[in-house]
Image: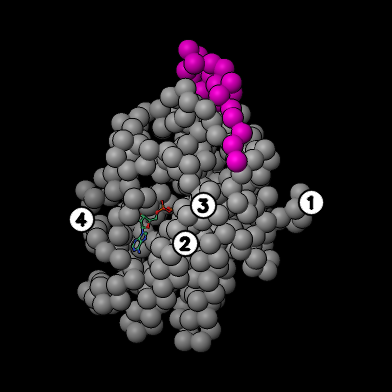
Amino acid sequence: MTILVTGGAGFIGSAVIRQLIRAGETVVNLDKLTYAATPEALEEAADSPAYRFVHGDICDGPLVARLLEEYRPEAVMHLAAESHVDRSIDGPAAFLQTNITGTFTLLEAVRRSGGIRLHHISTDEVCGALGPSDAAFSETTPYAPNSPYSASKAASDHLVRAWGETYGLEVVTSNCSNNYGPWQFPEKLIPVMVIAAVEGRPLPIYGTGANIRDWLYVEDHARALRLVLERGTPGESYCVGGDAERTNLEVVRAICAALDARLPGGAPHDRLISFVTDRPGHDARYAIDAARIRAELGWRPEHGFEDGLAATIDWYLAHRDWWEGIRARRYGGERLGLKA
Ligand code: NAD
């Protein structure tokens, strides 16, 4: 199968591409290489004759149409997005452009081309925030996005659904909880905390640290995405999650404990915990009921939170050159998302 992957130089897209290439698929990766891209994560795939990289924007309709014409993919996996909530608070325009207009552009190109299955990769954040005892998000939970990021992703989910219903496109959507693992850009919670702790800097926890997320190891998400692409029912959506609800404070304490064992000279790392001004509109809790993908597609995570976190921390300790280069040249770690 030939698959056009959008945003394949990102954190999740690169994990998907590594798995697809290992599985013998042919991949065309269309990526704009924004600040968030990690082309280094694709070195293994780049050695394969089954992999092509195209530097471009999903909002460029003629380019997308030309790629569909030239490579004739059977499927598109759509991961390209602006993905960081804090940046969406400071500058929502880029989120509306890529996440909404970009998805619209892609849908139109796929519609004109015909015969292509489109898998749209989305987030649980489109459902808004849960209270402490609310049931977990499922495929029937109403949408209630609270951030510019989640609103733009919700809009893209609705476009995908509408293009399926109205134009008969073969579409399937998945909504996943928070991912973590190797190659995650050092602006998201787990790499931010690992790197700060390694460097002996304060660990900046938003608010009281009581916000709850459901964590999934990125390789488990990538396997779920491949299953949804291959066997998901057209027109349906699938919730994907790790059954690993943790408060942010619990996550940071777990990172500190793991680093105490690995870097005893800097222990105890939890002395570095500091509480900072909360994110505006910070959703209290996300949780996913992944019963459908488990039952219909036989998926389940292979990594529990503790072993996935240990593997992630070991990876960041072994790839210091990578994140030091990003901190020096692309993003120095300054606080984002307070402009509201
Ligand atoms: P990321 O920010 O790491 O990567 C996004 C990639 O998209 C980058 O390589 C970037 O260069 C590319 N891109 C951005 N704008 C583009 C454009 N206009 N044209 C082409 N390429 C463009 O994101 P990620 O964490 O890998 O997330 C991938 C997808 O999964 C997103 O759609 C996101 O909403 C969704 N998602 C992420 C998580 C998570 O925890 N990271 C959870 C659920 C869903």
Amino acid type, label 3? Lys
Label 3: which residue? Answer: 339
Residue 187 visible to an observer of this rendering: yes
Label 4: which residue? Answer: 49
Q: CA distance from mark 1 to mark 4?
A: 50 Å
Mark 2 lies on a secondary structure that is helix
Other residues around mark 1 within 10 Å, as few (<14) / some (14–19) / many (≥20): few
Q: Residue at x 63, y 54 (%)?
A: 281
Other residues around mark 3 within 10 Å, as few (<14) / some (14–19) / many (≥20): few
Q: Earlier in the sequence, mark 4 or mark 2?
A: 4
Task: Kindly indicate the quadrant of the structure image that contains residue 24.
Answer: bottom left
Label 2: which residue? Answer: 92
Give how far across and how far down residue 269 sits, in percent.
55, 21
Amino acid type, label 4? Pro
Mark 1 lies on a secondary structure that is loop
Q: Kindly report which numbered mark, 1 or 4, lies closer to the viewer in this rendering.
A: 1
Q: Earlier in the sequence, mark 3 or mark 2?
A: 2
Q: CA distance from mark 3 to mark 2?
A: 11 Å
Query: Image check: 221 left or right of 58?
Result: right
Residue situated furthest right in the rendering: 133
Residue 173 visible to an observer of this rendering: no
Q: Are marks 4 and 2 in contact (CB under 8 Å)?
A: no
Mark 4 lies on a secondary structure that is loop
Other residues around mark 2 within 10 Å, as few (<14) / some (14–19) / many (≥20): some
